[in-house]
Structures are given as C-alpha cells and as structure tokens.
Amino acid sequence: MKRGVRAAFQGELGAFSQVAARQLLGETVKVVPCTRFDLVFEQLASGKVDAAVVPIENTLHGSIHENYDHLLKYGLEIVAETQVRIVHNLIVVPGVKFSAVRKVYSHPVALNQCLKFFADNQQLERVPFYDTAGSVKMILEQEIKDSAAIASSIAAEQYDGQILRKSIEDDVQNFTRFFLLRRPGSKPEIAGKAGWKTSLVFTTPNKSGSLFRALSAFALRDLSLSKIESRPLPGKPYEYLYYLDFLGKASDPVPQKALAHLEELADMLKILGSYPRSV
C-alpha cells in the first residue's frame, strides 16, 4: 500500500473511522477529518484526498443509509472493507478520579451502547454530544474535571486523556463495517484467504415477481448473498433501489453470467466495487 495516503473520514481525530483507516491503510495514513459524510465523498470525488473511509453498517444498529445513498450519487469505487470492534472507554482529564465524575458526554449511539454501565452508576448524567472523539476533545481542551467522555482508545491517545474504565459497552459483539473508497479506475486491492466480495445496486420493474426473478440470477449459480438492503427510489414513491453484496469477484466467469442475467431483468444495474472480503 502506498505510504502517506491521504484519507478522508467523518468525525474528529480519534474517531472509530480513524481506527478503520489505520487498519485499511496502515499507521502512516494521513487522515483528513470532515464534519459530514457528504463532505467525505466530495473530498475524494474532487481529488483533494487519495481515499475515503466510511462506515456502512453496525451489527447492533444496522445500516448507515446516508452512505448507501452517497455511494450511488458520487460514483466512487469500493476497493476494500474492514471490521472494527467498537470498544467504548470512559476518558477523563488526567488525574481526575471516578468519584469526581458527574456527567458523561458522547454521541447518543455510544451512550445507548453503555446502558448497563449507567445502570450500575446512576450518579452519572448522560449528556449527548455530536461525536465520540469530539466529546474527548471538548473535555480535555476545556479541562472539565467533573465530566468524562466515552470514545475509542485512540481518542484518549489523540487528546492526552486518561482512560478510567475500559470496554464499558454492553455487547462485546459490537462491530462496524467500513468501506475503503477510491476514485474509479484505481488499482484493486489484493484479496486474502477470505476471497472477494462484490457490492452492487439495481432497480427492477414495479410488477409482481420482479425481485424474485432478479435474485434467482444468483441462486441459480449458487452465489452466496451476504446482504440485501432496500432504499427509496427518488422521484418514484414506493419503488426501491436494492443494494446487494455477494461473495465472489465480478470479473470471474460465474459472477459474470449472474450479472449478465440480472442486467436483462433490471431497469438499472451498477457495480459499486469488487474487493477483498474481511472476516
């Protein structure tokens, strides 16, 4: 992998997306934080960065629908994926003791993933904040000594915070799947032992049996589907885009036949990327 790749992500330095960027591009990656997901896509589409790292689904909270919409809008290519285990830590200004903490700041999703911790510590007030890493940045910069933040360990590292409690999340099987995006035509990643995965989006005619026939293109060739997601089709109420992942590489012979079959049945078909499958 190219050294010093510039990669955009949504959130503050220390966000879980930065963890994903390191997993995908190595410790030398130069991260470019953005305030919104659409800005991440714009940074890459305009050539201001070399890559983008975006979350696409969480095992507890489901898909990040906004990013599915952006994948279609911006026409960027998925070239790799990774899974990040979401480990929530209680972070404070160095020297602050647990007994002094009265408020805990973090993103609402992170707060809701630590309910058992709050049930066991009812003296703590939950305070929603715009970002997990941003909450650490705020309490450290303002030196707020009666408050803590919930975020990743690299957020503590980034802002010189102290971790008071490690892994306070309710469910240790909490993972977020991230995509690595490049501009179209980039050199594909090299698949490991887990093989390839392909993501695509398609639409079908609005008539009975259309989706069944579309999916039969994969079933008839024993191709395994790992995900299917529907999104509203803009301008056509109660019609849908179907985002689908299957195990295999789009350019291999059997997937090629399945995709040719699907193209005959679909009103629209777009391959979003074939990339090394993460485990």
Image (cartoon, rainbow, N blue to C red):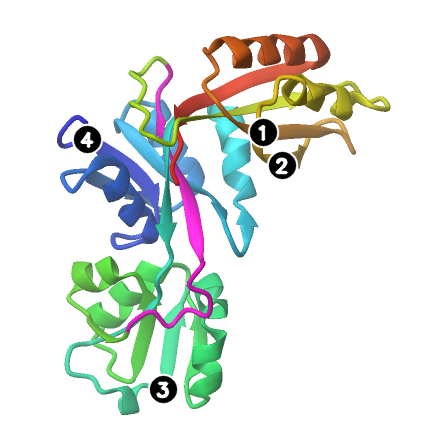
Q: Nearer the viewer, mark 2 or mark 3?
A: 2
Q: Mark 1 to mark 4: distance in Å?
A: 29 Å
Q: Earlier in the sequence, mark 1 or mark 4?
A: 4
Kind of element beneath mark 4: loop
Residues in magenta? 166-184
Kind of element beneath mark 2: strand
| Relative image position of residue 98 (x, y in whole percent) | 27, 86
Of the residues shown, which amino acid type is indicated by label 2?
Glu
- Crowdedness near tag 2: few (<14), some (14–19) or many (≥20) residues, C-alpha within 10 Å: some
Q: Nearer the viewer, mark 1 or mark 4?
A: 1
- The quarter of the rendered structure image containing the C terminus is top left
Is residue 179 found inside the magenta-colored segment of the image? yes
Residue in the foreground of this view, choosing between 10 and 243: 243
Of the residues shown, which amino acid type is indicated by label 1?
Leu
Residue 76 visible (yes or no):
no
Kind of element beneath mark 1: strand
Of the residues shown, which amino acid type is indicated by label 3?
Arg
Q: Residue at x 15, y 83 (%)?
A: 95
The tag on residue 102 is 3
Q: Residue at x 62, y 36 (%)?
A: 229
Residue in the foreground of this view, choosing between 152 and 260: 260
Q: Mark 2 to mark 3: distance in Å?
A: 41 Å
Q: Earlier in the sequence, mark 2 or mark 1?
A: 2
| Relative image position of residue 250 (x, y in whole percent) | 48, 15
Residue beneath label 2, please?
Answer: 229
Residue beneath label 4, please?
Answer: 5
